[in-house]
Amino acid sequence: MAHAVLAVVVVSLSLPLGFYSSQSYVLDDKQGLGRVFDGIGGLSGGGATSRLLVNYAEPYRSQILDYLFKPDFGASLHILKVEIGGDAQTTDGTEPSHMHYENDENYFRGYEWWLMKEAKKRNPNITLIGLPWAFPGWVGHGKNWPYDFPDITAAYVVNWILGAKQYHDLDIQYVGIWNERNFDSKYIKLLRYTLDKNGLERVRIIASDNLWEPIALSLLLDPELSRAVDVIGAHYPGTTTVSDALKTQKKLWSSEDYSTFNDEVGGGCWARILNQNYVNGHMTATISWNLVASYYEKLPFGRDGLMTAEEPWSGNYVVESPVWITAHTTQFSQPGWTYLQTVGQLAQGGSYIALTDGKGNLTVVIETMTHDHSVCIRPPLPVFNVTSQNATFLLKGSFASIKELQVWRSQFNFRTKNPSFFEKLTPLKLLDGSFTLNLVEDEVYTLTTITTGRKGSHPDPPPSARFPKIYKDNFNVRSPPFSEAPNFADQTGVFENYVNMTDPGPHTFTLRQVITERPVTWATDADQTISVIGDYQWHNLMVTCDVFMENTKTGGVFIAARVDKGGQSVRSAKGIFFWVFADGTYKVTSDLAGQTVLEEGQSGTQAYGWHTLSLTVKGQSALGLLDGNPLWNNTVVPSPKNGWAAIGTHSFELAQFDNFVVVAE
Ligand SMILES: *[C@@H]1O[C@H](CO)[C@@H](O)[C@H](O)[C@H]1NC(C)=O
Ligand SMILES: *[C@@H]1O[C@H](CO)[C@@H](O)[C@H](O)[C@H]1NC(C)=O
Ligand SMILES: *[C@@H]1O[C@H](CO)[C@@H](O)[C@H](O)[C@H]1NC(C)=O
Ligand SMILES: *[C@@H]1O[C@H](CO)[C@@H](O)[C@H](O)[C@H]1NC(C)=O
Ligand SMILES: *[C@@H]1O[C@H](CO)[C@@H](O)[C@H](O)[C@H]1NC(C)=O
Ligand SMILES: *[C@@H]1O[C@H](CO)[C@@H](O)[C@H](O)[C@H]1NC(C)=O
């Protein structure tokens, strides 16, 4: 596909008070069009990035979803990509699998089903994508590798797609291989075969959610593999592609991108890549990791979402600039529209793209983001210059007769720190099929024949507040359809609401850790399971919880305070961990791995009996109670000085928790 040569003409106009010039850019469909547009999307998961969203009370939760998905309102996303939960840590937490065990199937775990339904409720045309990061241990038969038994892995993934349809009426349109890990050609072919065999011919395969190579070359060399794959999905491509990828003639997507702190520079990053992923790299879809920053901010990559919703306890959320930057494209184009060939760089820096529905509608998006105001987290951004410029756009071909264009503008105004986003300006009247814009640095413009754009708004949410200092959960009140307890963020293992039908009370309803073998991991999960909760600034506090071990020989459980790490760093989490074991002993350690022992001794604890643990930390001293009696006291605790509260188990083993209480100072 040919791309327009930029700066076609230099128009000089003589004016009484001097001279100015304007570069001209032709927008034309006479020579044919460019690639078909597939949409702009957000990624929930990879991992647990929407964890706190589900705990928002109404109406705030629906408002957040409106800003993300509602057409002609906010980000109005075209694509929702979700993690196929694999019971393992995948960046900011674990997401539950639909098959924890080989003979287990449950399509009501986690929040991704709910999120897809909420997205579809708002936009019935939304494109849905699923991708695994990790797999339950049984899929790998104990090896950290999902391809030794490709038929099992394919059946496992296809079950998730079938379950989405059967239980939630969700049509998954695309499925991926193994996020940012090796692919296996034999597995991809088998996945294609298994999809087809199950009547899922319409489901397309994206490969390989990593770099352009080696998948592009593999597709060129292996026609059968090429028939199986519809889209090459690359991550963080830095707006460029490679010649092998172009030679495959496949759709090219930035299937994960952005991952940048969502302040105004984050918005600038997003504006630049949304345009330039097509201009430079021929990519027809761009998907943001992540959709919404709904995880504790002190977990890795805090606030790297299109908007922020990390305080379900207050109801506060923030519609950040990337939402409005997204709207510049999404509200004025749809998947199935086509890019014009005439797209490109602006002479004084920045870029423009143009899209058409093929029925006369035209949408032009222009960005003039400067280097320092559009740096993304990765890859490194080579230097370039952007200066103010006049740009004249000449509408040709079927666009020559357009008489009026709607105008939407965002100005970052970094100098005055007074940005204005997605502002509707007076429509432009076109006299001779052309218009000129006086562009300054750090702006985004949309010019379009589409008249339905709208800057949606809800009343301001409640003010931000810290996590409550007194927090209790007896796990008796469930919030269907969710399988997890509010605000607990699993970092290794999966903690689920559990009902013991045979228990007459008081422990009929509990929280249960259910993963019994190490998953096929994506990150370095801990050898222990752990779920964190609360305020990372907590220093002096008391944590109390009833615990129930179900592993008679090697069982062990803990409660903890001042836990300083989660996500991919969970293995090296420090804090104050109070453990009891099924062999009748206890320990106090300053790390999750249990390597630094502060106290140990006899506790008399056993499996299949409930015990109450209580941990009080004050300054440099800690105290532990077992069933109301002091077990250890005046233990000097080393750093960290603050962190989350937590519960967990000594290994991948069943255990239950009840009547969780935190009282913080
Ligand atoms: C969904 O797509 C169809 C066909 O492109 C279109 O007619 C319809 O308006 C779309 N619906 C929404 C809610 O966008
Ligand atoms: C543009 O799209 C609208 C629907 O959004 C449609 O009614 C109209 O016919 C299209 N064509 C033109 C030239 O505006
Ligand atoms: C950007 O502008 C500066 C100052 O005019 C110049 O020194 C530099 O070479 C330019 N860089 C690029 C990449 O054009
Ligand atoms: C753009 O055009 C205006 C006149 O409309 C002129 O005042 C200005 O200097 C021009 N800017 C540039 C960068 O050429
Ligand atoms: C369920 O409750 C019964 C009665 O209290 C108890 O004996 C049994 O161990 C419990 N089972 C589990 C898995 O919690
Ligand atoms: C722990 O030790 C402190 C200081 O010696 C003492 O004041 C306190 O009563 C002890 N707590 C318990 C529960 O024994």
Image (cartoon, rainbow, N blue to C red):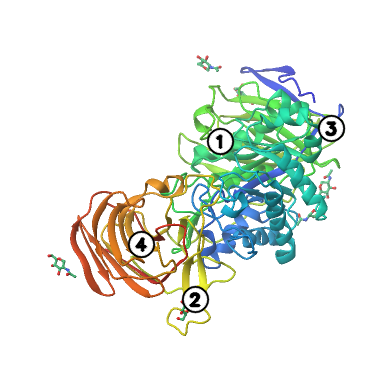
Circle 3: residue type: Ala
Circle 1: residue type: Cys
Mark 4 secondary-structure assignment: strand
Question: Please, is residue 325 above or below residue 459 in the view?
Answer: above
Which residue has dot 1 on it? 269
Tag shown at residue 97 = none
Which residue has dot 2 on it? 477
Mark 2 secondary-structure assignment: loop
Circle 4: residue type: Phe
* Residue at the outermost bottom position: 504
Badge 2 or badge 3: first in the primary sequence: 3
Image location of residue 462, percent across then percent down:
46, 62
Badge 1 or badge 2: first in the primary sequence: 1
Q: Are marks 4 and 2 in contact (CB under 8 Å)?
A: no
Q: Do the residues labelled 3 and 4 touch (CB within 8 Å)?
A: no
* Residue at the outermost front position: 553
Circle 2: residue type: Val
Mark 1 secondary-structure assignment: helix
